[in-house]
Amino acid sequence: MLGPEQILILGVAGAIAIGIIIFGAVTSRREDLVEARLGQIENDLDEFPDFAPGESDEDSSALDEGRKLLEPINNYLVERRFGKNARQKLARADIKLTVAEYAVARVASVAAGFAIGFLGWSSISIALIGAAIGFFLPVIYVGRAVNKRLITFENQLPDTLGLWVNAIRSGYSVLQAMEAIAQDAPEPTQTEFQRVVQEVQIGISMPDALDHMLQRLDSPDLDLVITAVNIQREVGGNLAEILEVIAGTIRERIKLKGEIRVLTSQGRITGYAISMLPIGVALLLMAINEQYMNRMFENRECGWPMIGLGLALIGMGAAAIQKIVDIEI
C-alpha cells in the first residue's frame, strides 16, 4: 500500500498536470484554433477535428514538447469509441484540448481526488469516493460547457437571423451576410460563422460547411435555419422573408421555454434537495460519529451493497424528476 508521502506526491503531481493542461489551453491555442481545425478538414470531413496546436516557432515552450509526447496516445485514442465521443464533446464545448490531454486530465483528477480523500480523512473508503468524484468531475464540466454554449448560441440566434435578413435585403449575398455576422455577432456565434466562411473560402461547399456547424452545435433551431438555406439554394425563393419568419418562431419558442423553466423551477429544486439529502445526512453522521459510519464502509458483505443500492436509487429518482420537469417544445 502506498504511504502518505507517496500519496501526497501523487496528488500534487495530479494537480500540477491539471494546471499545466488548463494553462496551455488558455494561453497557447486561441490564435491557432480555427487554422489548426481547418487544416484537418480535408483529411476527415465527417469527424470532429482535434484542437491541436499549430506549427511551433522558435519561441515554443515546454508545453509544445509535452503535447508532442502525447501525440501517439492521441492518435490511438481518437480511433476508439471513447476518443470519438470525447472529441465530439470537446468540439461542442469549444475546449482547446486534444483527446489525450482530456484523458490525462481525467486521470489526474482521479489521482487528486483519491489523494485529497486519503490525506484529509485517512480512510480508503473516503479516498475511493474522492477518486470517483474526480473521475466524473471533468465529464460534468465538459457537459455543462456544452449546454452553456448551446443555450448561449440559441439565445443569440434570433438577433443573428435579424442581422442576416438585413444584410440580404441590403444586397449582400448569403456568404457576404455570413461574413458580416462573423464580424459583428458576439461569441459563440461569431466563431461559428467565421468558421463556416473560412471553410467555404478554402473550397468546401456551403451545405457541407453548414452541416459541420450543425454537428458542432446540435441545435434544432439551427437545423431549421440550415434546412431553409439549403432549400433556397436549390429551388430559389425569398431567403430574407423565410429567415424572418424563422426568427419570429425561434423568439416565441425561447419565450415559451423561459416560462416553462419558471413554472418547473420548484420541481427541479425539489429534485436537487431530495437527491442531496441522503448524502448530506451521511456526511453529517460521519462528522458526528465517524466510527458509526465506518462500519458501513468497512463491511463489504452488507455495507457496500447498501451503499451501491442507495446511490442507484438516488440517481434513478433524480433522473425521473428531471425527466418529468423537462418538457419538450
Image (tube, grey):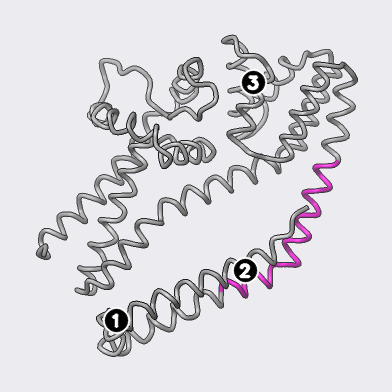
For badge 3, the amino acid type reads Asp
Front position among marks 1 and 2: 1
The disc, 2 or 3, on the residue closer to the chain's N-terminal end is: 3
Please give the residue where the numbered disc 1 appears in the rendered image: 301
Task: Name the residue at 40% across, 56% down.
Answer: 137
Q: Which three-letter amino acid code belongs to the residue tagged 2?
A: Ala
For the residue carrying disc 2, how many other residues have a C-alpha within 10 Å: few (<14), some (14-19), or many (20+)? Answer: few
> Residues in magenta?
249-272
Which secondary structure, mark 2? helix
Left or right of 254, for residue 301: left
Q: Circle 1: is it few (<14), some (14-19), or many (20+) Cα within 10 Å?
A: few
Query: Does residue 233 lie above or below 281 as drawn?
Result: above
Identify the residue at horizontal 38%, vertical 84% (top origin).
284
Cβ–Cβ under 8 Å for marks 2 and 3: no
SS for dot 1: loop
- Identify the image quadrant of the N terminus: bottom left
Question: Residue 320, labelled with which disc?
Answer: 2
* Residue 201 x, y percent position in the rendering: 60, 11
Q: Is residue 28 above or below residue 325?
A: above
Magenta span contains residue 156:
no
Nearer-the-camera pick, 120 or 199: 199
Disc 2 to disc 3, C-alpha distance = 38 Å
What is the CA distance from the residue labelled 1 to the residue labelled 3?
57 Å
Of residue 140 and residue 73, the one placed in the foreground of this image is 73
In percent of width and height, residue 45 lies at 54, 21
Q: Which residue is tagged 3?
A: 208
